[in-house]
Structures are given as C-alpha cells and as structure tokens.
Amino acid sequence: MIDPTLETKFNQHINKEIYSSYLYLSMAAWADHTGLRGFSHWMRTQAMEELTHVSRFFDFLTDRDGRARLAAIAEPPQDWSDATALMRDTLNHELEVSRGINELVSLCREHNDHAAGAFLDWFVKEQVEEEAVVKDILDRLNIVKGEGQGLLMIDQELATRALPTYDPTLGWLGNTR
Ligand SMILES: [Fe+2]
Ligand SMILES: [Fe+2]
C-alpha cells in the first residue's frame, strides 16, 4: 500500500503530465495555424505520449491500493513568436517535469518505498530522452536560424514521428520519436 503523502504527490504529478498533454495540444494548434504541419504532428504525438505517462501513474497507484484523483488542468499558453520559441518552451517544460520526477524519487527514498523508486526509474530515463530529443530539434533550428528552407526541412522530418502503440499484454510500446 502506498503512503498517503506519496499518493498525494503522485497525484500532483499526474496533473503535471496531463498539463503536458494539454500544453502540447495547444502547441499543435499554434503550429497548424502557422502552416507548420510537421511540428503540429510532432506535438499531437507528444500530447498522446504524455497521456501514456498518465496511464502508467494511474496503474501504479491502483496496483499499490491507492487512487488516481484528477484535479483541474491549468490553461496553457496559446501563442508563440516562432518555431524556435515553441521548442524553447518545450525544453523548459520538460526540464520542469524532470525536476518533478527527481523530487518524487527523493521522496520515495525518504519513505523507503523501493517499489515506487523502481517504478520511477522508467521516468528518469524517459526524461533524459525527452530533454535530448527536444534539445536536438532546438539545436538544428538554431543552425538554420529558425526560418526558410531549413525550417521546412525540419518540419518535414517532424512529420514522420510514429504514434504510440498499446499492447494489451506488454503495455505502451516503443520509442515513438
Ligand atoms: Fe511525460
Ligand atoms: Fe514529456
């Protein structure tokens, strides 16, 4: 059974993951409106992937005889000056989520909850990848100064990102980037 303090913190983190999904969907809407269809597809996929993270926390709380409790989702920003600003906000948001995961890991250690620690290991690794992928897109945007043909090339590449898939036995599968 999960400690009630941890349960509350895990639920607060569920809200962060749902907000991530909401933020990326808002970014997708901006990208659609701007004509950056690849960025929009990448953001929609990212939004779906964030919901798979919610699902993992949900299941973990249930398995530990806890309960997922959903709170209000904050309104995300709706406008960005350009694709570079969009990806900079994405990186900052992922850094914030990484901090949240790290705090949860520390808290689980304080409570001697090794099962929760093992569960969070997946997220620690996932955040390394999230940060690296976004940083890579941002670096390439900087190379092409975020505009012109270079921007369109990056947009085309982002259009190829695969959607997350769910296997009833194995759960969420694959690297979807
Ligand atoms: Fe996430
Ligand atoms: Fe994320």
Image: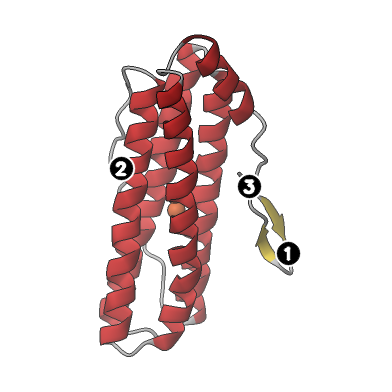
**Mark 1 burial class by Cα count in 10 Å: few <14, some 14-19, many 20+:** few
Q: Which mark is residue 176?
A: 3
- Where is 112 relative to 38, above or below? below
Q: Which residue is mark 2?
A: 92
Residue type of the residue flagged with mark 2: Asn
Q: Amino acid at mark 3?
A: Thr
Q: Is residue 95 above or below residue 77?
A: below
Could you say which disc has been placed on residue 134 in the image?
Answer: none
Q: CA distance from mark 2 to mark 1?
A: 33 Å
Residue 109 in percent (x, y) is at: 31, 84
Whether 117 is drawn above or below 21: the answer is below
Image marks 2 and 1: residues in contact by CB distance under 8 Å: no
Within 8 Å of ligand 1, the CB of disc 1? no
**CB of mark 3 within 8 Å of CB of mark 2?**
no
Report crowding for label 2: few under 14, some 14 to 19, many 20 or more residues within 10 A (C-alpha).
Answer: few
- From this viewpoint, which residue is outermost toward the top? 148
Which residue occupies 37% across, 48% down?
Answer: 94
Q: Is residue 11 left or right of residue 140?
A: left
- Residue picked out by circle 1: 168
Looking at the rendered structure, the number of numbered marks drawn on it comes to 3
Residue 109 relative to residue 122: left or right: left
Residue at 40% over, 18% down: 145
Q: Residue at x 33, y 44 (%)?
A: 93
Q: 127 and 115: which one is in front?
A: 127
Instruction: Kindly identify the residue that appears in the image at 27 percent across and 68 percent down.
Output: 103
Q: Is residue 70 visible?
A: no
**Marks 2 and 1, the one that precedes in the sequence:** 2
**Any part of residue 133 in sight:** yes
* Figure quadrant of the C terminus: top right
Looking at the picture, how far across and down is residue 155, in whole percent?
56, 22
